[in-house]
Image (spheres, rainbow, N blue to C red):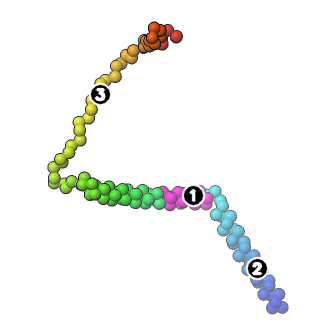
Amino acid sequence: MFRRTFWFTAGAAAGVWATTKVNRKLKQLTPESLAAQAANKAIETGHRLKDFALDVRSGMVQREAELGEALGLEASPDAPAERELPAPRRRAPLDATPNTTTTYSYRTMSYNRNEDH
């Protein structure tokens, strides 16, 4: 009698446990749950990328400072700037009307590219 009661209780408990597990898994696979999980992963990934970018930026600033110190490029804030940037070069304005009758000559032959059209 006790043996049957034990196995009946063990079977019922296993059934309840399995049903609970299946229902939890089914709830995790609903579209709303999947969308929420994807959004959470995207937010987490965004935070990790932001932290990585901040680490890279701080490393760049540190390395630039080290290189500037090693090359003697660091100037104190109260010291006058010894070197200034050169003035920007001025370029000649582009001609508004390009030459459309370009003539090429090779030895005695001349070629006008507008004659073909």
Q: Can I make out residue 67 in this image?
A: yes
In terms of secondary structure, where does tag 3 sit? loop
The quarter of the picture where residue 65 lies is: bottom left
Dot label at residue 12: 2
Left or right position of 46 against 57: right
In terms of secondary structure, where does tag 2 sit? helix
Q: Earlier in the sequence, mark 1 or mark 2?
A: 2
Q: The residue under label 1 is which amino acid type?
A: Ala
Residue count near mark 3 (Cα–Cα under 10 Å), binned few <14, some 14–19, many ≥20: few
Which residue corresponds to the image point at 20% horizontal and 45% vertical from the top-left?
Answer: 83
In this orientation, which residue lies closer to the viewer: 4 or 108? 108
Q: Are marks 2 and 3 in contact (CB under 8 Å)?
A: no
Q: Earlier in the sequence, mark 2 or mark 3?
A: 2
Q: Which residues are magenta?
A: 33-46
Q: The residue under label 3 is which amino acid type?
A: Arg
In this orientation, which residue lies closer to the viewer: 24 or 82? 82
* Magenta stretch: includes residue 76: no
Left or right position of 39 against 50: right
Mark 3 lies on residue: 91
The quarter of the picture where residue 69 lies is: bottom left
* Label 3 vs label 1, nearer the camera: 3
Instruction: For the N terminus, give its image quadrant.
Output: bottom right
- Residue 52 sits above or below residue 106 on the image: below
